[in-house]
């Protein structure tokens, strides 16, 4: 992989964009991806996502996104996400960062904690996830950007206008979205990475503009 900086310069940064379903994350990510090369021309970026990002990771993603719910035991569920993440880190994220390229990832460990552990009401497995993260030396992002959203709006938007078959993470009651949001907020409050919150009730353009403001500030501090 050809990096964006010359030998001897700083490694790249690891940025993670997280968000509730219905937060507009997909549209915001599309806008930010178009803006970054213009706003930060001295940086080279790799854009990726979880679960997935590699050939093996994408195969795991296909399993996870099938329209089923409690078929997968929670531990097996978490292990599948971690298997995808380990492959993702070793094959794409870490090599890019070491090469001086900045990585922007759509979802990461905060999502696993929010959806698999708390959303599915398996808080007793939170310590297992934490131990596995430490054992596997899962890399922490330099900055998390969380796109917040009210649970009721999140659920409404996740189900609005869906014609295609829904994944098992889409068809959920309101309580599920409340648990997910609470888990996100709690995770961020106890995370050692830099955290940026972007509140709800904004258009995708407004959210993208706020995200870009935070990214400009973040990179300017690193010069």
Image (tube, rainbow, N blue to C red):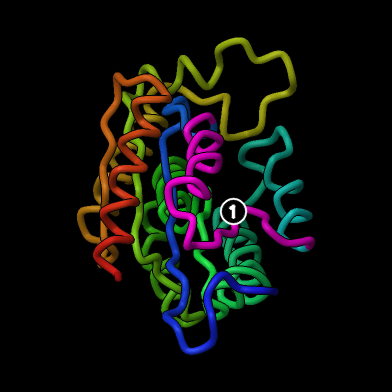
List the residue tagged with mark 1.
47
On the image, which quarter does residue 74 sit in? bottom right
Instruction: Write the residue at 51% across / 26% down.
Output: 172
Q: Residue furthest left?
A: 189
Report helix, strand or loop for mark 1.
strand
Specify whether 187 is left or right of 88.
left
Quadrant where the image shows the N terminus: bottom right
Q: Residue furthest bottom?
A: 8
Instruction: Write the residue at 57% across / 28% down.
Output: 170
Question: From which residue to which does the magenta span run?
Answer: 27-55
Dot 1, crowdedness within 10 Å: few (<14), some or many (≥20)? some
- The image position of residue 196, as x and y in percent, is 26, 48
- The image position of residue 167, as x and y in percent, is 66, 32
Classify 115 as above or below 221: above
Instruction: Write the residue at 49% across / 55% down.
Output: 41
Specify whether 7 is left or right of 40.
right
Specify whether 94 is left or right of 195.
right
- The image position of residue 46, as x and y in percent, is 59, 59
């Amino acid at each position: 992989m050809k990096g964006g900086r010359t030998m001897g310069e700083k490694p790249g940064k690891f940025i993670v964009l997280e968000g509730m379903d219905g937060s507009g994350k997909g549209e915001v990510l599309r806008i930010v991806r178009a803006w970054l090369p213009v706003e930060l021309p001295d940086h080279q970026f790799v854009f990726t996502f979880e679960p997935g990002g590699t050939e093996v990771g994408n195969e795991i993603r296909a399993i996870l996104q099938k329209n089923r719910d409690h078929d997968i035991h929670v531990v097996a569920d978490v292990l599948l996400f971690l298997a995808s993440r380990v492959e993702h880190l070793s094959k794409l994220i870490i090599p890019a960062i070491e090469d001086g390229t900045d990585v922007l990832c759509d979802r990461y460990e905060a999502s696993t904690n929010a959806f698999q552990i708390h959303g599915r009401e398996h808080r007793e497995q939170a310590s297992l996830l934490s131990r596995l993260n430490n054992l596997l030396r899962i890399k922490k992002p330099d900055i998390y950007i969380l796109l917040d959203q009210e649970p009721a709006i999140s659920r409404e938007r996740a189900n609005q206008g869906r014609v295609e078959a829904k994944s098992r993470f889409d068809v959920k009651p309101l309580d599920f979205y409340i648990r997910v949001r609470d888990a996100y907020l709690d995770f961020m409050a106890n995370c050692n990475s830099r955290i940026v919150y972007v509140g709800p009730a904004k258009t995708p353009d407004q959210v993208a503009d706020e995200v870009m403001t935070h990214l400009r500030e973040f990179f300017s501090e690193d010069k």
